[in-house]
Image (spheres, helix red, strand yellow):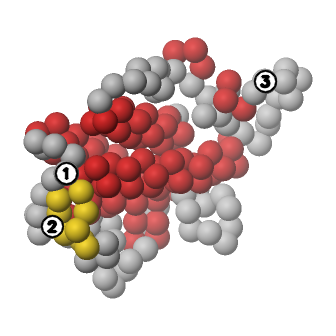
Amino acid sequence: MNVDNTTRRRRSDIFGGEEDIRFTFPAVGDERTLLTNVLAAQRATLELKCTGLTAELARRTVEPSTLSLLGLVRHVADVERRWFRTVLAGQEVPARFSTDEDPDGDFDGAVPDPEVIADAWHAWREEVAFADAYVAEAPHLDVEGHDAWRGRVSLRWVLLHMIEEYARHNGHADLLRERIDGARGV
């Protein structure tokens, strides 16, 4: 890992650069707009952390943890699917990468195979598109679903939970990516 320390810069200045528009949306507005903009920025952050990587996406760089960037993509695809399709939309669909027999399949199955990588990105984009459409079509944020873990949940709560989920995992992604090639930043 080669990190040029001759020019001192803030950690946040390194990733994204001046063209980074993830957080340029207005900081005022109605609740749905603010929540969906913040969630979109968190999703874009995870995607940015994975930019330019192929097989390295599956690298586990913080042993003994099985975390990898590819595992995070697979994990959040399953999380999006669970909350938006299963809990809120009431669809009876299985997780894409985890099962009762292999509850950590999202991480353990993250291997440096081009087909596995392409499938993870396809699944994630498909689940994000479904979630975005669901949120856009919902009449209000008090739409409810039922979850075996939490009981009754509102769309508002799910959006907040998804922001928290991505924010936590983006912190993991920061460390994973920096260990892979020294890239750092917001």
The tag on residue 9 is: 3
Q: Nearer the viewer, mark 1 or mark 2?
A: 1
Query: As drawn, is 87 to the left or to the right of 137?
Result: right
> Which numbered dot is residue 186?
none
Q: Earlier in the sequence, mark 2 or mark 3?
A: 3
Q: Position of residue 176 (x, y in %)?
A: 63, 51
Residue 161 in picture, x, y percent from top left: 39, 55
Work out whether 15 lies above or below 61.
above
Name the image quarter holding the N terminus.
top right
Marks 1 and 3 close (CB-CB < 8 Å)? no
Residue plotted at (46% across, 59% down)? 71
Q: Earlier in the sequence, mark 1 or mark 2?
A: 2
Q: What is the distance, in whole Å, between disc 1 and disc 2 at their CAs?
A: 23 Å
> The residue under label 1 is which amino acid type?
Asp
Asked which secondary structure carries label 3, the reply is loop
Find disc 1 in the rendering and name its residue.
142
**Which mark sits nearer the N-terminus, 1 or 3?**
3
Would you say residue 87 is visible in this rendering? yes
Work out which quarter of the rendered image holds the C terminus and state it. top right
